[in-house]
Amino acid sequence: MQAKRLLITISLLLSALWGGVLGYMHLSGSVGFLDRLESSLTDLRSTVIGAREPPPVTTIVAIDDQTAAGNGYPLNRATLARVVAAVSAMKPKVIALDLLLVDPGPEEGDAALVAALQHTPSVIAAAGVFPTDTQVVEHDANDPLADIPTASQMLLPQARFSDVAAIGVVNVATDETGTPRFIPLISRGAGRVDPAFPLRVASLALGINPAFSPGALALGDRHLPTDSGQRLPITFYGPRGSIPTFSAADALTGKLPAKAVEDRIVVIGSTVTGGGDVFPTPFDPVLPGVEVMATAATHLIAGDSLVRDRNVRLLDSLVAVALPLLLISLLAWRRSAIGYAVIASVALAWAALNIVAFAHGYWFSAALPIAATLPPVLLFGAAEIWIDRRQAAQFAAQSDLLQRIEAPGLGEWLARDANFLAEPVRQDAAVVFIDLSGFTGLSEAIGATNVREILSEFFELIEEEARSHGGAITSFMGDGAMILFGLPKPSEDDAARAAACAVRLCDRMRLWLAAHPALSASKIGFKVGAHCGPVVASRLGTGNRQQITATGDTVNVASRLMEVAAKRDVELALSAALMSAAGADSAPLRSGRLEGPTQTQLRGRSEGIDVWLWRGYAL
């Protein structure tokens, strides 16, 4: 129990430390090694929740395969100007060109596009170029832009276009699988700071300039929590086309529905096959980039983006500490079907709450609690199994030792029933006593070591015969022993087996004494007494040390019969009661000379009993 308590204490402390370290790293956004797992679990949650209808905020006019087939690809500026003009005529709130217009085109086309962009509030795309796929930022509480990576180069539109339209950066933050997870709302590079493309679009549509504070964005009365680095978590409404999408060819031919454009944000971008601007998402392996931008703009207008700010990360960190502590406590409390059911219920409840929160727009980490919980719980379980196996090995050794030291056959009953003979039981039994004669004097002459070796052989001989005849050695007494027949349950042949055991003990003792030089030279002898009748079987001793034995007149008579055997110069004295129960003509008794019955007075008893005397033919 001490080892188990120590294991539980250490496990709880280490799990709290492990969860705390992971939680601290999660707060600072430095647990990138969990990103792949978190991405998979986020996709799973999105799939479980399923696709949903987007708010009627945004429409996509796609430069698709149909447009490319009729007008070529890339679309020339003059044709693009016609598309913008056709959309502008339907009175959208904002026209957003998800196209990089970094190079000059033919003058006529560029001029036409500039003229088309002047009629409606417009946003055109810019992009930041970073030296590596992963950016490292320095955290600085005094610098609100410290968490925003700096681009090595900015791809900006031609000045003539940016003079009539606002600029928005189209970069997205993807995970290891390439799925867009965040929109950086601010980008910086080359001495300038620019808003994200969706933010610029939403700002123009609402007619409100954005205001940033640590972990939040305000668009008028809209307050949107943001993640570290002023990033907007993004989730998807469904596969491509979830946001209403129309072909730019329809705009050119006058087939674009006016109700799909009027008073909406219209994002114009490429969806042509092989264009390369696609991303994998939970609902679609090739979602066009223009739909990613349209989705983010819709989030900002509708306020339905995922919430993953510092408060959410703080709750993640608390769960990373609390969940492993709870599961280890439950595992330590009860390792049973009920205990495992409770543990499974806690895990399922956490998973269900996580999914429900995700469905309501709160992105709590799934990977962090798993990473914080699995290692300590598995290590604790492994340590418990190791301790249990050690204890099982110890119990097995103790059981084996109990079988050797305790009465044969009684150890199994004690193992099955800890209350065996906790209360005294009165029953019939047969009792056999055996004792060495003259051994006390010999032990003084041969020394303690030799005495131990001789007694070990003597006790082993008795144990073998007791076991073979189904008896229980209830005690070894110096150079003698008491064998009981009838425990743990009385049987009709207890007396017969006792008589057979007594005879067999005489035969083996005779041979053993003759073969042992020290014993044969010292004329050591033995005596055996056997009787049957009612006994009281019980445990004797205190709670710390108990011994199973039998008491009563039957036991005393059996012990006194050894004195009768010694006085009459025979090996074995049996009571008439045992002979009657065993049968005087039983085969073991016929192996020697049997005399009796003889009325005999026993020491300490006022009344005599009938006794049979037995000696082997070898005498």
Image (tube, rainbow, N blue to C red):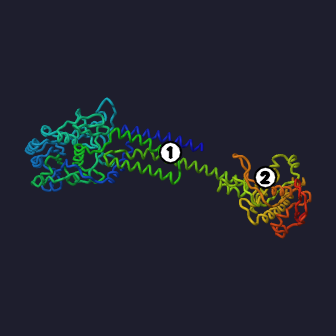
Give neighbour class at mark 1: few <14, some 14-19, many 20+ (Cα, 10 Å). some
357 vs 495, left or right, is left
Q: Picture quarter containing residue 98?
A: top left
The residue that disc 2 covers is 476
Question: Residue flagged by tag 1: what amino acid is it?
Answer: Ser
Callout 2 secondary element: strand
Q: Position of residue 422 (x, y in %)?
A: 69, 52
The structure residue drawn at horizontal position 33% and vertical position 47%, both measured from the top left corner, is 358
Extreme-top residue of the structure: 142
Q: Is residue 134 visible?
A: yes
**Nearer to the camera, 311 or 450:** 311
N-terminal label among 1 and 2: 1
Callout 1 secondary element: helix
Q: Position of residue 296 (x, y in %)?
A: 24, 45
349 vs 421, left or right, is left
**Nearer to the camera, 464 or 522:** 464
> In which quadrant will I find the C terminus?
bottom right
Question: Residue flagged by tag 2: what amino acid is it?
Answer: Phe
22 vs 247, left or right, is right
Extreme-front residue of the structure: 606
The structure residue drawn at horizontal position 58% and vertical position 50%, both measured from the top left corner, is 388
The structure residue drawn at horizontal position 9% and vertical position 44%, both measured from the top left corner, is 116
37 vs 58, left or right, is right
Q: Position of residue 150 (x, y in %)?
A: 28, 36
66 lies above or below 181: below
The residue that disc 1 covers is 329
Q: Is residue 78 visible?
A: no
Counting the numbered discs, the total is 2
Cα separation between marks 1 and 2: 47 Å
